[in-house]
Image: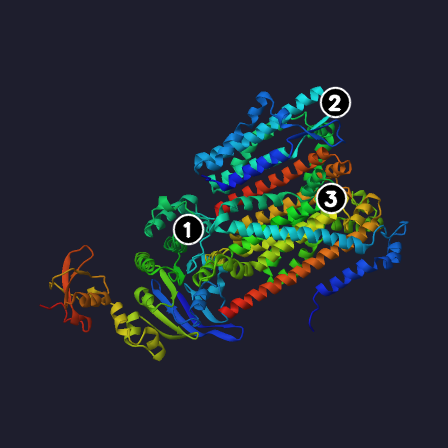
Amino acid sequence: MRRIDPLIPAAIALVALVLGMPALKPLFAWMFPDQARPLYEQDSFLSLTLDHLSLVGISSAVSVVVGVAVAIFVTRPSGRAFRPLAETLTAAGQTFPPIAVLAIAVPLLGFGPLPALIALALYGLLPVTEATVAGIEQVPAGVREAARGIGMSPTGILARVELPLAAPVIVAGIRTSVIINIGTAAIASTVGVKTLGLPIIVGLSGFNTAYVLQGALVVGLLAAVVDLAFDRLGGFLGRWNRDRVAKTA
Amino acid sequence: MVKNPVLLVLVVAALAAAIVLSFLSHAPNRLLSGQPVPWGVVLEGWRSLAFAPALVLLAGPFLPNGRITHGLVALAASALIAGMIWLAGDVARSMADAAAPAARTSFGGAFWILAVMAALAASDALQKLTREPALRIGLALLLAVPAVFLVADGFIDALSIMKEYANRHAVFAAAVTTHLAIIAAMLVPTLAIGLPLGLLVHRRQGLGRPIFAVLNIIQTVPSIALFGLLIAPLAALVAFAPALARLGISGIGVTPAIIALTLYSLLPIVRSTAAGLAAVPTAAIEAARGIGMTRGQIFRAVEVPLALPVLVAGLRVTVVQAVGLTAVAALIGAGGLGAIIFQGLNASAIDLVMLGVVPLVGIAVLADLALKLAGAMLKARTG
Amino acid sequence: MIRFEHVGKDYAGWTAIEDLSLTVEKGEFCVLIGPSGSGKTTTLKMINRLIEHDRGRILFEGAEIRSFAPEELRRRMGYAIQSIGLFPHWTVEENIGAVPKLLGWPRAKIRDRVTELLEMLTLDPERYRARYPRHLSGGEQQRIGVARALAANPSVLLMDEPFGALDPVTRDTLQAEMLRIQAASGTTVVLVTHDIDEAIRLASRIVILEGGRIAQSGSPREILAAPANDFVADFVGRSDRGLRLLAAERVGDRMRRGETAVGEPLTVDASLREALSLFVARNVDRLPVQDGSGALIGAIRLADLVRPPPSEAAP
C-alpha cells in the first residue's frame, strides 16, 4: 500500500477550514459554552486568508528578487569585496527578532499594510541572500572551471550551471523566509494589519479563546501546508539535479 | 582611487540618510509626532566637534588598505557612535530647558542609520583586521564601551527614550528580568528533552526522519498560533485538575510561553546534537575502541567534546530565536519586553516601543556574541 | 603469544573466516596480506575483540581472549590504523598518553614515556608535545599514531594498513623506522597490508589469506621461492617474483668479504634488488660494499645475485 502524501489531506483540511468555518459554529458553541459569540464573524476566514497570503506573497516576492540579486552580485568578481558585509548583515540581521523589525517599521512608517510589507520583505531578504550565496559557493570549482573551459560566458555559467545547481539550497532559503513571513504576518495584526492573526489578537484581548483557536488553527495549517509544499519542491529539485548529474556522469 | 568600496557604500548611505532624515525630532508631548530638529541646531557651535571622527570615515575609502587604516576606521566608528550619543543628549538637554516639561526630543531616523552604518564600518574593519573570531568579538565589545558608558552615565537622560525609561524603570527592570527568566526556564526542559532525543536520533538512524518531521512541523507553526493553541488545552487541564492552578499553571501567562518555546527549541537542539555527534570522526572512535576505552569513556572523552562546538551553535540559534519569541509571548500575558513593545504600539508611542525593542535586540545580539565566542573557543581547541 | 585454533567468523549470509589456525610467536613481525575480502582485517580485529569470533579459540599469552574484559585486552595491545584516528581535541602528548592514562600511570611517568617515544620516532619532544593533530603532516600524525599504540609497552602491536594513506617517500621512512623500533623493542607485531612489497620488507613471516583461509604462511623468502599454489604465485607477482626475492635478501648475505671494487659503495643493509638496480644503472658487474660506519669491507658481483658466492674462502 502506498502511503498518502500528508500534503494532500493537510491542503484539503486547510481549504475545508477556511471555507467551512461557519459550519463548525455548533462545535465551538459546544466547546466554549460560556462564550456568547463562539465564532469569529467580523471577517470571513477566506478574506483573512487571502489578505494574509497576499501580504506574504508580495513581501516574499520582493525578498526573493532582491535577495537572489544581492547574492549573485556578491559572488561575482566585481562584488566580492561586499561579501563579508553581506554576510555580516545577514547574520546580524537574523539575530534581530522579527517582532522587533515589525515594531520599528510600523511607528517609523505609519500603521497599515505597507510598513508591515516592507518589514517582512526586509527580514525575508536575509535567509534568501544567505542561502543563495551558500548555494552558489557549493557549486564544485571543477564544474565551474569545466564550464569556462568549454567556452561558456560568465552569464551562461551563472544561468546554466551555478543557479540550477544551487536551486535546492536557494529554495530551502526561500522556504525559511516564507515560513518566517507567515508567522510575522500573523503578528502584524497587532499593528492593525488584517491577517489571520486578527482573530487571535481580538480573541486574546477579548478573552475569547474560541477566536484564538480558530485563527491559530487556520494559520498553523496554512504554514504547515506551505512548508510541506516547499519540501516537495525541494525534493523534486534535488532529484532533478541528481538525475542530470547522473546522466552527465 | 577607491581602496575600500564597502566603506564607500556605507559612507554614501550614511550621507544620504543624513540629508533625507532628521537626526533628532522634537514634539510638544509624547503623543504628538515630532518635528525634525534642523541640522543647524544640532551642529551649533562646539557641539559639531562630535562629528570629527566622521572625517576619518569619509577619508577611509581612499586610504591604503592596511592594519593602521582598518584600526583607525574601527576606532573612528566607535568614537562617532559615542559622539553622536553625546551630541543627541546635549541637544536634547538644551531644548528641554527652553520647552515645556512635557516636550519630548527623540532620536530620528538619521541617528539610527548613521549608528548602524558606523557599526557596520567597524565590523568590516575588524573583519579585515583579524581572522580570529574570538579576538574580533572581544574587540567589538571593547569598541562598544564608550557608547554604553555614555548611556549608563545619564548623558542622554533628556531624550524621550530615557524619559520613558525613567517613568517606568521598575517596570522595565521587571520586564528584562521576566524576559531572561522565561528564556532560562525554557532551557531546562529544552535541554532535558532535546539532548537525549538528539543522542537517540544519532544512535538509531531510523528514528531521525519521523522525529525531525514532527519537530519541523512544530517549528513551522507561527508563534502567535502556537501560543494560542496552547491556551484552550491548558485551561481545560487546569479546570480538570485545579491543583495545577495552585502551582501557577494556567492557560495564559508563563506556562504556555515556556511550553511553546520548548517546542520551538527542540528542533535546533536535537538537530545540532545529532549533527555534532555525527561529525565526530569515525577514525577517532575506532581508535578509541582499539586502545581500550569503554563506551562511557569514548562518549565522555571523545564524542561529547568533539560534538560540543556544533551543539553550542545550535544553542545559539535556540537562544536567539527564544529572545524574539518571548517578546511575542507577551500577547498571552507572559510579560517581558514584549509587553512594553505592545503597550507602545497600542499608544503609538515610538519611544516606548524603542524602550522595548532596543534591549530586546541588545539581549539577542549579546547572547549571539557570547555563544559565538564560546563556540569559537571550543572550535579552536578541537580544530 | 597469539594463537588461533580453528577460528571462524560469519557475517549475515557469508563466511568471512572459515577455519583459521595460526600461531604468532613472541617477537615475530607477522604480516597478514591478501586481496580485499580475504579476511585479513577481520583476523586482526578478532585479536583485540573489536570483532568477536564465532567459532574456535583465540589465545593471548596462553589465555583465551574471552577471559579478559575487551577493554583490558585492548589496553595490553597497541592498535594503529590507516585513518590514524588521533583525537583532534587532544594535544600530541595527551594522544600518546591516552592508554597510560587509562591504566592510571602517574603523570611524571607518562610525560617521560611521551618524551621517549617522540625521540624514538625522531620527533623533537619539546616542539611536538603541545601541538594539536591538525597542525601535523600526515606522516607526523601517523608517527604519533604509532607512538600512541606503543605507549604502554604493549606485548603485541596490531596495525591495520598503517602506512596505506601516506605518500611513497613518507611510507618508506616510516617502514624503516618501524623495522628499527621492532628490532629494538622486540615487540610482537601483527600488521595488515595489501602491499606485497611492504610485506616483504617488514615481515619475518607473511600469512597470505584468500577467501577467509590461509593460502600460505612462511618467511618472505620461502613464499617467494616456492609459492604454494597459483593464487599465491599470482599474488606475489609472476614476472616480478625474482625481483621480490632479491628484495627479501641483504647485500651482507651474499658479499665477498675482503674483495675490492671501484666506485660508489653499497651498504651491507641494502637489498639485493637495490644492488641489481645499481649494477644496471652503472653498467658494471662488481660493486664495493661498506658497513654502517662507512668502512669498506668487501664487494659483490652481479653473478652473486643468482647464486651465493663460494663461502669466505673467495680470492
| Secondary structure beneath label 1 | helix
Looking at the rendered structure, whether the residues under marks 3 and 2 are on a common chain is answered as yes
| Secondary structure beneath label 2 | loop
Residue B306: percent from left, percent from top: 52, 51
**Hey, what amino acid is under mark 3?**
Ala
Q: Which is in the foreground here, disc 3 or disc 1?
A: 3
- Taking the image as shown, residue B206 lies to the left or right of residue C151, namely right
Q: Which is in the foreground here, disc 3 or disc 2?
A: 2
Q: Chain of mark 2?
A: B
Foreground residue among A172 and B92: B92
Q: Earlier in the sequence, mark 3 or mark 2?
A: 2
| Spatial separation of the CA atoms under disc 3 and disc 1 | 53 Å
Foreground residue among C306 and B15: B15
| Secondary structure beneath label 3 | helix
| Spatial separation of the CA atoms under disc 3 and disc 2 | 35 Å
Residue B65: percent from left, percent from top: 44, 38
Residue A96: percent from left, percent from top: 64, 43
Foreground residue among C71 and A58: A58
**Hey, what amino acid is under mark 2?**
Pro
Q: Is residue A114 above or below residue C16?
A: above
In the image, which disc is placed on residue B101?
Answer: 2
- Taking the image as shown, residue B362 lies to the left or right of residue B170, namely left
The residue most toward the left is C315
In the image, which disc is placed on residue C96?
Answer: 1
Q: Chain of mark 3?
A: B
- Residue matched to label 3: B329
- Circles 3 and 2: CB distance less than 8 Å? no
Q: Is residue C24 above or below residue A59?
A: below
